Image: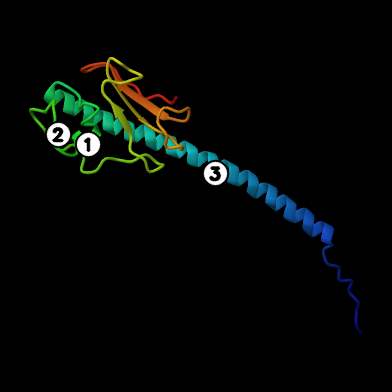
Amino acid sequence: MRTTRKQRGFTLLEIMLVVSIIVIILGVAISKLGNTTGIAKSMRVQADIQAIKTQLQLYESMNGFYPSTEQGLQALVAQPQNDPRPTRWYQLFTDLPKDPWGSNYIYRNPGQKNSGGYDLYSAGPDRQPDTGDDDCQGSAESSHAHEAARPL
């Protein structure tokens, strides 16, 4: 004796509803992941700037001054050949860190945003200095001044 079973599949409407729900969930997850990536990049910029500032303070404590704009952060990697020449130079970085967008950090001494010290920041995602998306300004007033990195 055979029993008949009623086999019923999913309708097209039911399948479309499930696919739509999955797409919405994936969209929300991807948007949250994108925001996390931005936060991670900003945190990396802050960490890099803090590391560079620490080496700049060491350079200043050994020589009595920070590197000039012309010498730039490269003065932490290779001994400057132009004035003001450091009296006690040590290689403080083997390679300078790049920001998360692949650009060099911007250093100016004297600073444009901080005329009493230096400016140190990332150009941000657009890789253009002095625009609205510049990330994490770091600066110093003078020798042994209190310094803080802050998002712009």
Residue drawn at (82%, 63%) of the image: 10
Relative to 96, 47 lies left or right: right
Nearest to the observer: residue 42 or residue 10: 42
Pick the quarter of the image with the C terminus: top left
**How far, Cα to Cα, is label 1 from label 2?**
8 Å
Rendered image quadrant of residue 66: top left
Checking the image for residue 33, the label placed there is 3
Q: What residue appears at the point 22 percent right and 30 percent down from the top-left corner?
A: 70
Q: CA distance from mark 3 to mark 2?
A: 43 Å
Task: Write the residue at 24% across / 43% down.
Answer: 95
Asked which secondary structure carries label 3, the reply is helix
- Give the residue number, with chain letter if any, for mark 2: 80
Which tag is nearer the camera, tag 3 or tag 2? Answer: 2
**Where is residue 86 shown, x and y percent of the image?**
11, 28
Residue 63, percent across and down? Answer: 12, 24
In front: label 3 or label 1: 1
Number of residues whose C-alpha sits closer than 10 Å to that of mark 3, classed few (under 14), some (14–19) or many (20 or more): few
Which of pointers 3 and 1 lies earlier in the amino acid sequence? Answer: 3
- Mark earlier in primary sequence (3, 2): 3
